[in-house]
């Protein structure tokens, strides 16, 4: 059985539902409430499908390319760590993606679903947390459930985005994003170290 709390927190860090709220507000600011709900539902659905596809075929693709999973764990840990560093020290997720949204079409798929919810960090986490060699089918299903639970939180936050934005403000979202970045950096370091350990044990 997986650690539900640790898995939920890890996915919460990489998906960052709170950091998605300012992005959602920015790209839907000229829409009515019904359109906002539609965008939120489509964005959540698309991101769920994208991440589930990575859970199902991500490892298969790696094996087809003859890339050992420990090597992917190391690379994934490094990439996640760099992603976390940008959240902590560089532009936070809200600031970065709102800038992106201002020059993009007002759509649910871009930038809300991808890359805000189903970003590179979330895609890597979906593969790393469902490795066939480390987790059985039931544990993988539990992990997917936790991933969907985080997306459900993201959907709820988007549906009440106006109120959330007024409560936490742009500065609050930025602070929370940096805290999530620190948590993600810790998880990424652990993944890289475990990958190095497994690689030399092969």
Image (cartoon, rainbow, N blue to C red):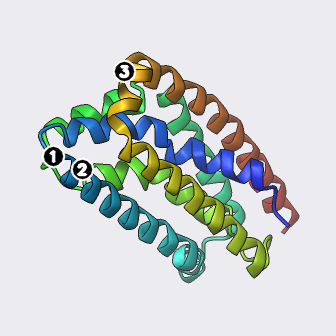
Q: Are marks 3 and 1 in contact (CB under 8 Å)?
A: no
Towards the viewer: 192 or 160: 160
User: What is the x, y in percent for residue 116?
Assistant: 37, 47
Residue 36 badge: 2
Residue 139 position in % (x across, y down): 77, 72
The residue that label 1 is drawn on is 32
Q: Residue at x 43, y 71 (%)?
A: 49
> Quadrant where the C terminus lies?
bottom right
Q: Position of residue 6 (x, y in %)?
A: 76, 48
- Residue extending furthest toward the top: 171
The disc, 3 or 1, on the residue closer to the chain's N-terminal end is 1
Compute the Cα span from label 1 to label 2: 6 Å
Quadrant of res 143: bottom right
Q: CA distance from mark 2 to mark 3?
A: 19 Å
Horizontal relation, residue 96 to residue 74: left or right: left
Element at label 3: helix
Classify the position of the N terminus by image quarter. bottom right
């Amino acid at each position: 059985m997986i650690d539900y709390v640790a898995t939920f927190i890890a996915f919460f860090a990489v998906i960052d539902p709170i950091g998605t709220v300012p992005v959602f507000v920015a790209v839907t600011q000229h829409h009515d409430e019904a359109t906002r709900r539609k965008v939120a539902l489509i964005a959540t659905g698309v991101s769920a499908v994208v991440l589930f596809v990575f859970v199902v075929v991500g490892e298969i693709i790696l094996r087809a390319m003859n890339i050992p999973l420990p090597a992917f764990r190391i690379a994934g840990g490094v990439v996640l760590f760099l992603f976390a560093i940008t959240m902590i020290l560089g532009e936070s997720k809200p600031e970065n993606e709102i800038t992106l949204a201002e020059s993009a079409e007002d759509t649910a798929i871009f930038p809300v679903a991808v890359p805000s919810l189903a970003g590179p960090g979330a895609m890597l986490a979906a593969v790393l947390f469902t490795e066939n060699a480390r987790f059985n089918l039931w544990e993988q299903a539990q992990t997917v459930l936790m991933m969907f639970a985080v997306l459900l939180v993201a959907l709820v936050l988007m549906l009440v985005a106006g109120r959330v934005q007024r409560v936490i403000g742009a500065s609050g979202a930025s602070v929370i994003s940096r805290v999530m970045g620190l948590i993600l950096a810790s998880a990424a370091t652990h993944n890289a170290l475990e990958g190095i350990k497994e690689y030399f044990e092969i």
